[in-house]
Amino acid sequence: MILANGMRYDSAMQDSILDSLSTRLNQTLEKPAPSADIVIAAIDKLGQQVAAGAFDEQIAGLQIDGAEKYKDLAIRLLRRDYLEFKVRTELGSDFSTDMVTNPPPGLAQLRVLTRPLGVLLHIAAGNADGLPAFSVAEGLVTGNVNLLKLPQADNGLSLAIIEALLEIEPSLAEYIYVFDTPSSDLAAIKRMADLSDGIVVWGGETAVAAVRRFAHPGTKLIEWGHRLSFAYLSGDVSHRELADLADHITTTRQLLCSSCQVVYLDTSDMDQVRSFCDRFFPVLEASAKQQQPKTMGAVAALTLRSRTDRLEALLDGGKAKRWQSPLCALIVKEDSALELSPMLGNVLVKPLPRERLLQVLREKKQYLQTAGLCCPPEEREALTQRLIRAGVTRVTTLRNMSASLPGEAHDGEYPLRRYLRTVNVELTTQTDDRLQ
Amino acid sequence: MRFRSKLFGRSDPYDIAGTEELFVSAVRENCSYVYQHCPEYKTILDAEGFSPDRLRSAEDLAELPVLPTALFKRRRLLSMPRRRLPVVVTSSGTSGHASQIGFSFGDLWAGLKMVLRVCRKRRLLSLRPCHYVVFGYQPNRKNRTGASKTAFGVTLFTPALSRTYALRWKDGKYVLDLKAVQAAIVKHAKSRFPLRFMGFPAYAWFLMKQMDAQDLHVRLPKGSKLMLGGGWKQFYTEEVDKPVFYSLAKKVFGLDESDIIEFYGAVEHPILYCDCEQHHFHIPIYSRVLIRDAETLQPLPHGMPGLVNLISPMVRGTPLLSVMPDDLGVLHDNCPCGLNSPYLEILGRVGLQDVKTCAAGAAELLEQTEVSL
């Protein structure tokens, strides 16, 4: 299904729509971009529809655990006050007002205008439901025309959200095009890329590398790649904090960029690492039992794994592995490298004395995201600064590692800024007069 | 192996009722042998308090300790020295670890008798030569997967005039070459000899879609058959409804639904399940299938979905007597085709569907994980 100018077309129409796209885009770009206010008002209304249950069926169809929580988060993110706060935080309160520089005496003044990049191609990943629509919303708030290539795994939720938005604010129709082009149809995607001023790509290294291969070197690339996160524990850790970490691990199932893959302990003593595991494992297991999956497929997988573990332990002379249950496991390693864990409740535990923190984390500088920090209060600031110098972009408590914190940047950047360009116009007599 | 030999020598492969006692005896015989020759199997049976002598009636089969197929990926379990195992097959490698299963001469002989009986019943054996298109791996000394062996084995059902492979060994790796396959089909469509396809259903589906998109429709010679096996793995998202598949086969190849035959089997349970005219996988006399509760592993009555427990006394080289793959299934009775044996419907794989992730490298890792939680 393709969406163009608010109308649905069959996927087979793709090439003919692409043929006329350049002309259509140029017509739209001739006009002033829609103001952030109009877009925000429309999104706010959309949020009210979500709250009233307009998308309950689709959300239920996602078959995700915690669908209610997901819906609540969406409602919060779509509210006018939140959106205005986001725009203010990321762009400053007067970004839409043209300004004039005020240089030292004797230097010429200059007009400074913030304008949309123009046309954004969003290559969305299927790893978060509704994410494609969210990416388009960010492009709209900044006044861009948006071409969205849906992920293969999209279940129709993104299109439904976008159509509802257009029903609320039909004037946005020419600012959104949605294509269900498969990733294998490189020729079509390249055509879309050639029509765009910026390409927003969400996904793993393969997706990002592919875009870099076909994009014109002059096209701006906005890459939201995959990241790795970890917990850093120093000094005494209370039971409450262990429970927070356990809940974070079992609720995100370690699948998110911000999910803890490695629990680092501020020590080089392996005995301390092992005694930590003795303490942490029962807490993790208790949390995992709370989060236990309910579908037959998941229960069956657990039963099979449990039986396989048991038989393997029998063959090992009856020794069950330490810190391992069918639901979760702690995997102790003596090295300190930041790496992906086996996920789904299987977390790595490693020693990492603070003196070596920067050296170790720099090895994975391309991937760093969240550090969940737990330490004595008097050391918190010093350790935070150390983590920041090592390259992490978020420092949180253990509980909030994957929480969506209002006003936060995305992987070290405010996305809205990247969807805009700063334009300078030399003051001439005419414009000068007009300004006065 | 008196009882196995008798069981695999029976002429009607679906006479379940008439072979009940013989089946139990063959299981007992196999169990005793493997118990004595595979120390790991003995350890498991001893720990679970099961003795091979306990197997007296069909009800006792449910008591046999079940080995998940995942165990064979973690451990090499054999009941004979390697020199007595002429064939060692690895599972088709969707996971990072492949299992190794050894077969003795006796196992292979029993298997051959089974294949001939089942295929004769389905009228797949013929002296009329055929062209073969294999939607699978070109045989290669480095490829020991069961799928490639089965796909090649099937080309021996009739004398083969030619064999064309979709996955060709080229410069040290396998490449998918649907163009060559398409060219072969167009050529053989004009032949007076039938064409038989064998292999992964997903490749057949892709090929048919590709040919249809190019408006390339052929009418294959009479007697041509589309034989599908090896599962839809790697292509779960592209899985299609069977009626859609059949109608595309009619459109592109001119094949009737009755010319399409599907097989089910696994390296860890090398019993040939061939579908009937209703496309149901009936249980042959060489095996029994129990569906077990996903949580408690208690046996369930027919009609209830659960984990699939496959029991067969065919193999002595490896303890495959009672195994459990990562499948969910359900047993049904009363197939209109007239066969009295129950049939197995595979509902899907265990695990969570659609794991979504943005942790670096995670998607790649999860793709390789067979049992994901």
Image (cartoon, coloured by chain):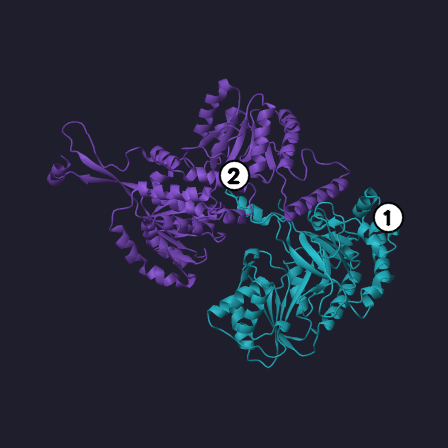
Chain colours: A purple, B cyan
Q: Residue at x 77, y 41 (%)?
A: A314
Secondary structure of the residue carrying numbered label 1: loop
Q: Residue at x 43, y 56 (%)?
A: A180
Q: Which mark is residue A282?
A: none
In this picture, residue B12 sits left or right of residue B96: right
Task: Report the amino acid beneath label 1.
Answer: Ser
Name the residue carrying label 2: A69
The x, y position of residue B151, in whole percent, is: 65, 65
Q: Is residue B46 visible?
A: yes
Task: Work out which quarter of the rendered image holds the N terminus of chain B and state it.
Answer: bottom right
Among all residues in the image, which is located at the extreme front? A52
The x, y position of residue B211, in whole percent, is: 50, 70
Q: CA distance from mark 1 to mark 2?
A: 52 Å
| Category of crowding for the residue at label 1, using alpha-carbon neighbours closer than 10 angstroms: few (below 14), some (14–19), many (at least 20) | some
Residue B5's place in the image compared with B184, above or below, is: above
In this picture, residue A193 sits left or right of residue B223: left
Residue B344's place in the image compared with A324, above or below, is: below
Residue B155's place in the image compared with A132, above or below, is: below
Q: Front-most of B258 and B218?
A: B258
Q: Quadrant of residue A349?
A: top right
Both labels 1 and 2 in a single chain: no
Name the residue carrying label 1: B51
Task: Report the amino acid beneath label 2.
Answer: Lys
